Image (cartoon, rainbow, N blue to C red):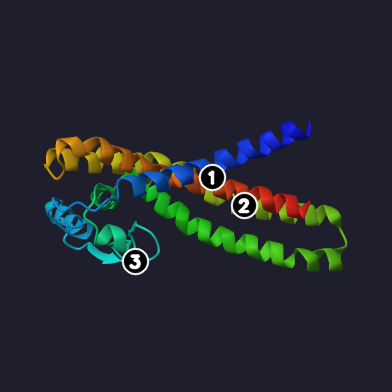
Amino acid sequence: MPFLIVLGVVALLALIFGPQWWVKREMRRHGVEREDFPGTGGELAEHLLEQAGLTDVTVEVTDQGDHYDPIDRVIRLSPEIHGGRSVTAVAVAAHEVGHAIQHRDGDRLFLARIRMAQIAQRLEVGAAILFATAPLVLAFVRSPVILVVQVAVGLLLLGSRLAIHVVTLPMEFDASFGKALPVLEGGGYLHETDVPAARSVLRAAALTYVASALVTLLDLTRLIRILR
């Protein structure tokens, strides 16, 4: 019985952290600098934005992870992507430009995610207030039922992050394979022999949100166990 429990825990940890490990592995694997690449990831992003007519979108360096900010209309790239000359740098930069194109085209899922993210921020604030005031409610009202309801509502509010990740997944695959890969292949930005590596990186870029969703689920599970 203890062996089965240990096996179950190992399987659960592999399910949760396996995708994260794979994503980082693929990014590192194809992140080798290439002297034959004519430009960096940042330069490619700027070029692709100009090609797409998105002259109002800028590119800058960040330490907060690669992403497109639809509010400030800016693509933010990590230093190794912005200044890198590798398949990973090129593919990730093209992926983020794909999000900017989705925004330009009024993609339904992209716009839905923006609205959900704004709502989720408010819901998470509400959840924090519910958890912070739970001891006071129990002290003054002295009703375990009300406390349980309050905590349950707080957990549901935190679960909004998980819903965002679910909506995000098809949008991420479109940015990778509906936008970035056709541009990289059709525009001749990569040699034919580099396309499989770019496809692998783009798949990893899309699945980043699966890994985030699983970690969010783990966080909620931990919180439930603590509250029990």
Looking at the image, residue 68 lies above or below residue 195 = below
In this orientation, which residue lies closer to the viewer: 41 or 100? 41
Lower position in the chain sequence, tag 2 or tag 1:
1
- Residue in view at x 55 percent, y 49 percent: 215
Q: Disc 1 versus disc 3: distance between alpha carbons?
A: 25 Å
Q: Position of residue 184 (x, y in %)?
A: 18, 42
Lower position in the chain sequence, tag 2 or tag 3:
3
Whether residue 104 can be seen here: no
Looking at the image, residue 65 lies above or below residue 28 = below
Under mark 3, the amino acid is: Thr
Q: Mark 1 points at which residue?
A: 17
Choose mark 2 or mark 1, whichever is in front.
1
In this orientation, which residue lies closer to the viewer: 96 or 116? 96
In this orientation, which residue lies closer to the viewer: 80 or 147? 80
Q: Name the residue under label 3.
A: 62
Q: Position of residue 2 (x, y in %)?
A: 77, 35
Q: Mark 2 points at which residue?
A: 219
Q: Disc 3 on helix, strand or loop?
A: loop
- Residue in view at x 16 percent, y 43 percent: 190
Q: Where is residue 111 in the image (x, y as percent from the top left)?
A: 36, 50
Q: Disc 1 on helix, strand or loop?
A: helix
User: Quadrant where the N terminus lies?
Assistant: top right
